[in-house]
Image: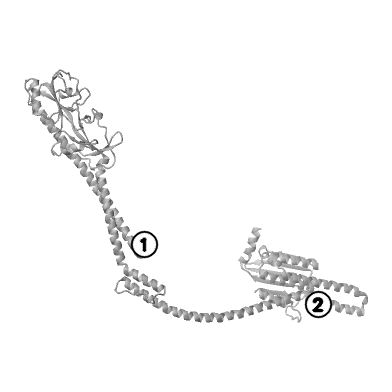
Amino acid sequence: MTIDPRRSLVAGLIWLVVALALSFACAASLWAGRVAREIVVQQHVRRLLLETDQLGSDLGQAVSARMAAARSVRTATPLERIFAVLVAQYPDQGWIALADETGTVIAGDGSFPAGTSVVAAPWFSGGRERPWIGIIDAGGDSLTGNRSPLLGDLSLPLRDAAGRTFGVVATHLTWRWATGDLLRLSAGPEPSAQTLILDADDRVMVGPKALLNRRWQGIPTRGPQPIETAEVVPAAHDPTGPAVHVPRFESLPGGQPVLVARSPVLVEPDTAAPGWQVQLSEPKERVYQRADALAVRILWISVCLGAATALIGALGARHLTNRLRRLTRSAASVGRNEIERIEVPHGRDEVAQLAGAFAKVLDDLRSERSELLALSGELERRVAVRTREVVRLAEESRYAAIVRERLNIARDLHDTLAHSMMAMLSEIRLLRKLQAHDPASLPDELARAEEVAHSGLNEARTAIAQMRLNAVRDTGLGPALAKAFDRFIDRTGLIGEFASDSEAARFGDERAETLFRMAEEALRNIERHAMASRVTVSLSIKNETHLCLQIDDDGIGFDTGLSRPGHFGLLGLREQSQLIDAELHIRSAPNEGATLSVTLRIAPEVLWPLDAAAHST
């Protein structure tokens, strides 16, 4: 089976099913992946928010517990005794130190030697007024040796019953009370989340050494946030207490985007004293890592399901189109003349109806083909009859052309040789009379007869040359008439005038030759019979559709109604005008001259080829 949809309807249906299945699968996977991605991201953000809230709550409880222990020793007991009590109450502390009100270390576990002055230390000056949290270094080294970002140091004031500060206790928080999720976030060489403790001015109190005592440099980013709300949500551990800000994306000075979540540290009972905040920050790519992996997984699952659906759909489409495929094969076999009729399948579906319609059309075509064969035979017989008729008409047309050519030759002979022979006959008769009555004038008449013979010979040669050459076709009717009229004037010595329109002068098809011969015949008649002194020839276009040739003379004229047996000049002019479907008018009377006019209807496009030739030159 071909898989080219341009050659197979079944292939086209299969490809359509495949395309639709894969398209819907991809669209659904993209939509579901996007929704799942948003859900996973929001879950991640909410979990980070809960962890931040939990960390703030745990830290607040730890600080509150230590503050309660410090307040419980409001007595004049020596400071060494107080140190022993605190160590006994909190054995999980990494280290502990006690300084008096002058800033001298009274007791400790070895981190600060006794007698050391810490009056300038931030933990002492800060711890005298209120609880202080941060990182206490001794000589620039870590006091615990292996400090984690979750570890911090705490200093608290020791007050007597009157509220007077008589010492400061400093201790290291190991944060063994921290939740497993917080420890997991900070575990490994590259922790996924960074934990900081900030004061009320956003200054880092606990965190990496590079950030200590510096303000947090994160700038909120523009664009969509993980949780689209500008409100704050209540703290998880105390819904009635202060609020926790919604996590948001911030950009660090280096351009790295991070997700930041903060929660206040609540210290009881002095809730307003510290103003601390716990902050968890996580790189944006880690926030979306699990969500992107889930979206990709959904995409692959959807594509696989779409491919399976496309395969099942393709198999189903092929099964459903089996009847159509069998019909196609049957029609192709009929086309190759392998079988007589199309196989019509059983059933009432569209394929069965289509096969029945094809079978009926095929039967009708065969019936019409038989009728066409019979009609074709009849047409061939009629064509043969018409062919023989056309051959006969062609023979008659050729015979008519020969007759027309004979008439042309007869007219030319009449116009040339006949006139010359008549002139020579007249001279011979005159010579006979002179020989009998006036022999002395015989030489002059013999010379005249010789001149007439030469003139007739020249006219015959001119006629033959005109029959061989076609000056009218080459130059146009106007220039040919002008040359013929000039020869006429030179030969006869008459006064003459020739006028022609520029458009009429360009006329030069086969009808122009006939007009030219009619003009020559008219001029010969004027020369021999009119005894005129002036001749005028004009050629013009009238109404842009008719060509008019007019010849006038002031000779003796003649009666146009008289019959002249043996003279064929006027008869030849009428025959030639009929050949070209022109109107011939001859007006004359005795002693009133004669006018000959020929009017020929022409189309404007007849002059176009000559116009183009004139422009090209």
Going by the numbered disc 1, the residue's amino acid type is Ile
What scheme was used to colour the molecule?
Answer: one colour
Residue denoted by label 1: 3
Q: Would you identify the image quadrant in which residue 554 lies?
A: bottom right
Disc on res. 572? none
The residues bearing labels 2 and 1 have C-alpha atoms spaced at a distance of 97 Å
Q: What crowding class fits label 1: few (fewer than 14 Cα within 10 Å), some (14-19), or many (20 or more)?
A: few
| Residue 232 in view in this figure | no
Q: Is residue 294 above or below residue 497?
A: above
| Res 412 → quadrant | bottom right
Residue 161, relative to residue 442: is it above or below? Answer: above
| Residue 107 vertical position relative to residue 260 in the rendered view, above or below | above
Which residue is found at the position 31% from the left and 58% from the top? 20
Which residue sits at x=90%, y=73%?
443
Q: Earlier in the sequence, mark 2 or mark 1?
A: 1
Compare residues 13 and 245 and report the one nearer the observer.
13
Residue 422 is marked as 2
Dots 2, 1 in contact, CB < 8 A = no
Element at badge 1? loop
Amino acid type, label 2: Met
